[in-house]
Amino acid sequence: MDISGAASLSGLEVRHDQGELPGLEELRVALRPPALPLPYPREVIEAARRAGDLLHAERYRDARRLVDAFRTRPAPSADRLALLHAGLRGALRVADPEQVERDVGDMVALLTDDGYRELASALVTVLHERRALPGGASAVPRGRRRGRPTEPPAELLAVVRGLDDHAVAGEAGTRGGDVDPRRLVAGLRTALAALPAVRDQLPVDPEKALRVSLAQALELQGDRAGAITEALDVLERIEQEEIALEDAVQDPRRTATAAHAVLARALGVDHPVQGARHALDALAALHEVDDPPLRVGLISHLLRALMAAGAITQASFTAGRLASLQRTLQRDALRTAPLLAIAAQRVQAERYEAAWVPLEQARRIACDQRDHRSSLEASRLAASIHERTGDHDRALHELRRLASEARWLADDLATERAHRAELVRMELNAQALVMRRALDLGRTELVEEAGEGIEHRARPEGGRPLLPPELLWDHRVDAQVARFIAAGEALNRGEEGATTALYERRRRAAMQVIDGVPTGHDHRARYWAAYVDDRHAQMLADRGRVLPALRAARRARAGWDHLARPDDVARVDLLIAHLEQD
């Protein structure tokens, strides 16, 4: 499922593009796991960062213990706020109302004492909106006049809503959620638009966190170019801050790592060297981070980038390390992507027997989890293996599964429109391959089935089409021509149910669809018409029907001549000469 995306490349990307693919020694260093156990945090800000890492690794109890251990230690307010925020995120994820109330209470007290009364009120308001607080819990801070509740401005509420952890579908792209990416994008854009008006009412500038969340949401929405732009903007801002401070920026939520991860995914296919470099930059920040989901996810994208760049040796080494590391993941659902990446690398290396091991493991997990996207990729790889090894019957079976999975995902209401278009394209291409392979194997019923599937998906209908009309028309013609050829071959083989009347209906249906050519595509229509006449002439000749075959052959010759295809003209001339002798 390679979805191409365009992006304007900034200076940061240009520097990556001028680099080279990593050598084996660089990969050995980058793929080395952290030395465990990690040093215990000494400062509150270190504990906040470690707690965030533990949350991302889904080690919620460990994160809670760490937050509680540093909860009362003296530290700058910004550091304590980062720690308490990590605790709140963990409490929200495990749906612990008592702990949520405690964390919110401590955050409200800290913000109020530091003069951020409106921000404290906005936090409580947003959590009530999310129904994350029990009724009456964590009372809104009171104003000084008559004890009235502090009313946060709308702009501050918009920013806090954008920072709400439950509004983001997974961090660093390793987890998804039951959220609408369009709603996420709209909310985050609203937060960024509101930020200048309330920036001085915030203890820490949240712009980088908002922008990296926007990059992730745009990626979920299928807007690769937008995701690349936002992720690059985050990295540029961090670079500028570090130059100004002459020191590393405190980054408890690892926004730089998340930005590199977005770029590794978004650039890995179309710009594989850049994608690999961003994956390596993200991995370089993880030497003291024990987060298997993030590490394995990054290595999976590094592997795909190396494969796309044709770096066979580096890809083989990376796949070997990934095969070992994916076993450290606690949830099977997180293992499908690395297993499929490993299988794809072994297919590329023509190690087909070795590819079946991770492929079948991934397929089993995908089936258990009802993960149709992973099942689709597994079918694509399996079909490729069978085609390469000459097992055409099994290739046909896998192509049918591929078309079925693509159809299911394209019709799923949760699939974004940008992704639906690519899935429809994949379904149509898979059905076209099914028809061709079924024709080769003489499986008339499967040609019919695939042709009907294409006709159903590509038929003219109301509303804006997902794919260009000329592409849909070409698929419809392809389907009708395949059904026409299958009917003729079945008739020649004497199959039960094959009749001359059916054959003629299929031929007329093909010509009727050809006649419905979209404006500006007459040349393609002439090709299809000549092709149908050509095949019609040959099949009539095979059945000994000389005169009809001769008429069809002459029409085909005129068509090929008009299209300036001398090889086809010469071939039909031989048929005409043979028929005229008869």
Image: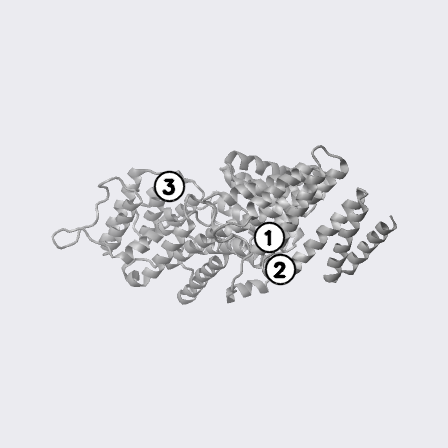
Mark number, residue 93: 3
The residue positioned 39% from the left and 51% from the top of the image is 183
Residue 541 % position (x, y): 80, 46
In the rendered structure, the answer to whether residue 532 lies left or right of residue 377 reads right
Amino acid on which the number 3 mark rests in the picture = Arg
Residue at the farthest top position? 496
Q: Earlier in the sequence, mark 1 or mark 3?
A: 3
Q: In the drawing, what numbered circle is on residue 473?
A: 1
The amino acid beneath tag 2 is His
Q: Is residue 325 visible?
A: no
Looking at the picture, the colour scheme in use is: one colour
Residue depicted at x 34% and y 38%: 95
The furthest residue to the front: 547
Question: Can you tell which of label 1 and label 3 is closer to the viewer?
Answer: 1
At horizontal 39% and vertical 65% (from top left) the residue drawn is 245
**Residue wearing tag 2:** 521
Label 1 sits on what residue type? Trp
Q: CA distance from mark 1 to mark 3?
A: 48 Å
Q: Is residue 82 left or right of residue 283?
A: left
Above or below residue 361? Residue 541 is below
Q: How far is disc 3 from disc 2 in space, using C-alphas?
A: 55 Å
Question: Mark 1: which secondary structure?
Answer: helix
Q: Are marks 2 and 1 in contact (CB under 8 Å)?
A: yes
Residue 57 place in picture, x, y as percent? 45, 43
- The first of marks 2 and 1 along the sequence is 1
Q: Earlier in the sequence, mark 3 or mark 2?
A: 3
